[in-house]
Amino acid sequence: MRLSVYRWFLLALCACAPPLEAQIIDYQIPHSVTTADIDGVISPGEWDAALKVQLDNETDPAQNIPALVATEVLLMEDGENLLAAFIASDPEPAKIRAFYSDRDRIDQGDFVGLVLDTFNDERRAFEFFVNPLGIQMDLIMDDLGGDEDDSWNAIWDSAGNITSEGFIVEMKIPLKQIRLASGLPLQTWGVDLLRYYPRDVRHRLSNNTKNYAVSCYLCQLKKAQGFPNFQQRTNLQLIPTLTAQAGEIRPDPATDPWTREDAKFEAGVDLRWGINEDLILNATLNPDFSQVEADEAQIDVNNTFTLFFEERREFFLDGSEYFNSFENLVHTRNIQDPDYGLKLTGKSGAHAYAVLAANDRRTDFVIPGNQGSRVASLSGANSQDLALRYRYDYGRRLTLGTLFTRRDADDYANNLLSTDLSWRLGDSDSIEAQVMYSDTDNPLSVQNQHQLAAQQNDAAWHLEYDHEGEHFELELSSVRFGKDYRADLGFITRTNYTEHGINPGYTWRPGAGHFFNEINVSASATRMEDLTGLKLEDNQGIDFSVEGPLQLDAGLSFNKGESYYAGRYYDDDNLSLFASVQPWGGAEFSFEVSKGKDIDFANQRPGDELSLSSEISLRLGRHLQIDLEHEYQRLEVTGGRLFASHLSDLRLTYQFSARSFIRAIVIHSTTKRDTSLYNNPVDAQEKSLDTQLLYSYRLNAQTRFFIGYSDSAIQEGMLDDLAATGRSVFAKFAYAWQY
């Protein structure tokens, strides 16, 4: 009965959705019989056929005023590629902020680029940016969730050149690298042409204006047409990979001798086939899914929930946005050691669909709860993983979706079914909703180790209303996760609770010439209960933030409340301050400090916590970059300091050119404890040190060579000082053949 009512509710919403409105075409992208040389130089006659567009609007921090500097964009197409050139004038070229870096790391400096809504559905877009030295950054923009993902990597050409009058950037974007509607007489895209001009503040210059009373971004873009009767040619990409690794380990340095591991050589292959313009098949055999670069370290002390790590592996990244929903139900990092993988993603008209299938020789999954989460492992189990996603876009405002996932191995299985909805009620108002149901069979080993029933099944839902006006904002949210709900292919760490919240806010934008560019005040109130009605958390807070000179972003927040843990309530008051500033080109400093009440989870008592995180990023010249992050956390309880933890992550990078770099990474952590304040035995001190030296050479985003050395050391238990536990050398080569 409930499913039937829900189905009729969705049908009623579809009936209310408005039809597509006729659109004004602002630009006609001309066809050129010759292509341009991508060298950062505008040669005579090379761009004569191009459409010329001026970036004459500043949309941030000032609102729709004339741009401070002139930028001309040249656009044309040659039948297979979109070609763009940016001529960026600068009255003070010496102040241009341009640095050599690896791809996707140019956002501190000057850069230009395009946002392309290639399906013209005002929901998702491709973004391509280039700095004055030709370094690339590409992203997927999801306007439904308000997210940008820079983990996606396309193969395209770019070049930059700093001149006496500013800089020039040229770009060539093959249409086979992006997705677009097939079978149309003309391609119609939403287009935003952008320049970021960072000086005392970071100016955003565009060919579009921005209405701050309209919550969607892509719906405000001008429309461009071109590529008449485009027919995609063969679109096949084959990427063979070869990896090699050798090393030594000693799990317990106090007692174990060094053991040499056999050298490993692995070959694999990835395939990407563009069946047509909007349907892509990805396949992989014997892939090497090892990570070349170390994850950013995180403090994991006095924490009861599983830590989250981003996906970085190429096979999973292409088309990953097709699996997105409001809750994280497909987190492919769960698939750790597959023999094969197959993925099909596409969009046809209003219909988007995605299929992912893989095996996994290592099967781990999160077991969530309302007080914490655990990770279960199935020893020796080879699981099969499947995700199916379908989304229907009705008009410009309504999107409906469904998702099914399954993991199974021997006597283990987890099935999940989800339905979601996103509906823009007007220019400033939207609703998002998601209903989920899961069914799990637990093997005997998991039942015994984690005290679970043989079978679990339960439901969850998510409902949110957002108002994003020119000044006033309001968010109302309500979620419920059943006690036995599980999303083993996703990342859900908390269940057995309901939570309701309200978050109003007001933003002032004083405009050009004022000291502060933006001032925001917001409040929040949330209440969380378990499914029996027991209060778990009750918090109220107020936040104040400003943006100003030297690209200042700073804020102060105060939260007051209480939290329930292991049979009693604890005060949960907290005061925090954060700030980020760029005092000169190539330098960024940020910090966040928080002080307040917390829970000593290990000993079940109240405590006073102080936490501090800071980041320093320095560019010394165009080639050398220093990044340092430091985190500090301490907890005071009756009787003294329970623990103090330090975590430092230092990365030194010398970028020889746009293609190659060498990077040294040092990650050091220390935790000191007062053992007399613990109810159970603990180590008085723990230390770890991880180092890595990595060299990379890249022809393009998919053709890369890595070689490196890494080692690790720990101090715990009976050790007097740090002792090495592992060391290895590794190399990886991948080459993208394109047809």
Image (cartoon, rainbow, N blue to C red):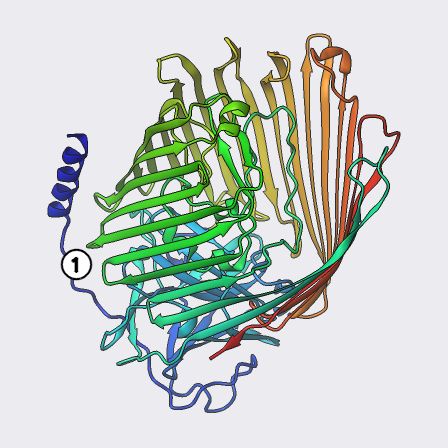
- Quick check: 525 above or below 545? above
Closer to the camera in the image, 515 or 473: 473
Closer to the camera in the image, 418 or 221: 418
Which residue is located at x 88 percent, y 29 percent?
Answer: 720
Which residue is located at x 44 percent, y 36 percent?
Answer: 411
- Pinpoint residue 237: horizontal percent, then vertical percent: 48, 73
- Quick check: 284 above or below 540? below
How many residues crowd mark 1 within 10 Å: few (<14), some (14–19), many (20+)?
A: few
Closer to the camera in the image, 706 or 633: 706
Q: Name which residue type carries label 1.
A: Leu
- Pinpoint residue 36: horizontal percent, then vertical percent: 47, 85
Q: Could you tell whether 430 is left or right of 65 in the image?
A: left
Residue named by callout 1: 20
- Pinpoint residue 131: horizontal percent, then vertical percent: 56, 67
- Quick check: 356 above or below 553? below
Q: Is residue 192 visible?
A: no
Instruction: Give the mark count.
Output: 1
User: Within the image, what quadrant is residue 712 found in?
Assistant: top right
